[in-house]
Image (tube, rainbow, N blue to C red):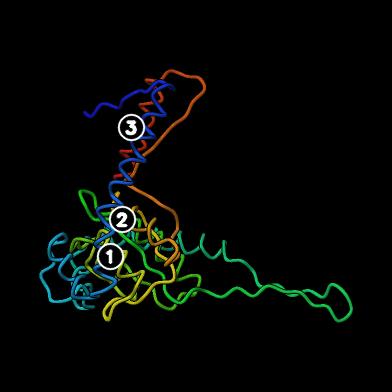
Amino acid sequence: MAMIRILEASQAKRLLRRKAARLEEAEAVVRPILENVRKRGDKALVEYARQFDGLQRKSVTVPVAEREAAAKRLSREFRAAVKTASANIRAYARMQLPPERKETVAPGVELGQIVRPLDTVAAYIPSGRYPLPSTLLMTAIPAQVAGVPTVCAATPRAVDEIFGTAHLLGVSHVFQMGGAHAIAAFAFGTRTVPRADRIVGPGSIYVAAAKKLLAGEVGIDFVAGPTEILLIAAEGDPRFLAADIRWLRLWRLR
């Protein structure tokens, strides 16, 4: 069983400085990748996908037939779970939709608010040691509920649980690509990959670095990295608090 370190408050600043330094190192790595995809488009994108993502086909586009076949291979229990989760997420997303308003505040003065969806939203879905179809559900469905006409998903590996879930959700575009090159493709757009108005979803430190560097080029949710949990407590037994974190991490991976 993996052990969880318990840090004293005096050690926290050093840990945070180390995290910042790692992100700066990752930025230095991804800068040339972003520039290469910007200049060379699909050619650079496919080269990186072959090198890092194990891409076998000629294009990063995952054909509808491949997604449909992946969905058919999913277990009955998995499909049922997707159906239940989808219904719950859609209901919550509908509840969050901002209402359009119009109000007359004075003679001849009418104020209002009109809400329009983005044209294209791209969801980055990790598929490393633990593929995360849950991330696909929680990013694609709110975009669909909001009325976004083009919802894209990118994932580094060919995983039935992600390709199949994308098919069940009716995601319009699915790509097998990961890392900084996937973020660059959505930020700049290529002949194959549509330019996104916003990129959402977690990823590796290189994905986080790419999103940070391209935040002025494309909208992002926030700079997220690997799944990490930090619990700050003014009192309590550190061993029990660490046990809570351990339970949360195991729950997150289920």
Q: Amino acid at mark 2?
A: Val
The x and y percentages for residue 234 are 52, 22
Between residue 92 and residue 123, name the one nearer to us. Answer: 123
Q: Tag 3's secondary structure? A: helix
Residue at (37%, 29%) from the top-left corner?
14
Residue at (28%, 65%) from the top-left corner?
182
Q: Earlier in the sequence, mark 3 or mark 1?
A: 1
Residue at (41%, 28%) from the top-left corner?
12
Task: Report the mark closest to the observer, 3 or 1.
Answer: 1
Q: Which residue is mark 1?
A: 182
Tell me the quarter of the picture where residue 180 sits.
Answer: bottom left
Vertical order, 153 against 207 (above or below)? below
The x and y percentages for residue 226 are 31, 46
Q: Which residue is mark 3?
A: 246
- Tag 1 near tag 2, CB within 8 Å: yes
Q: Which residue is mark 2?
A: 207
Location of the C terminus (image quadrant): top left
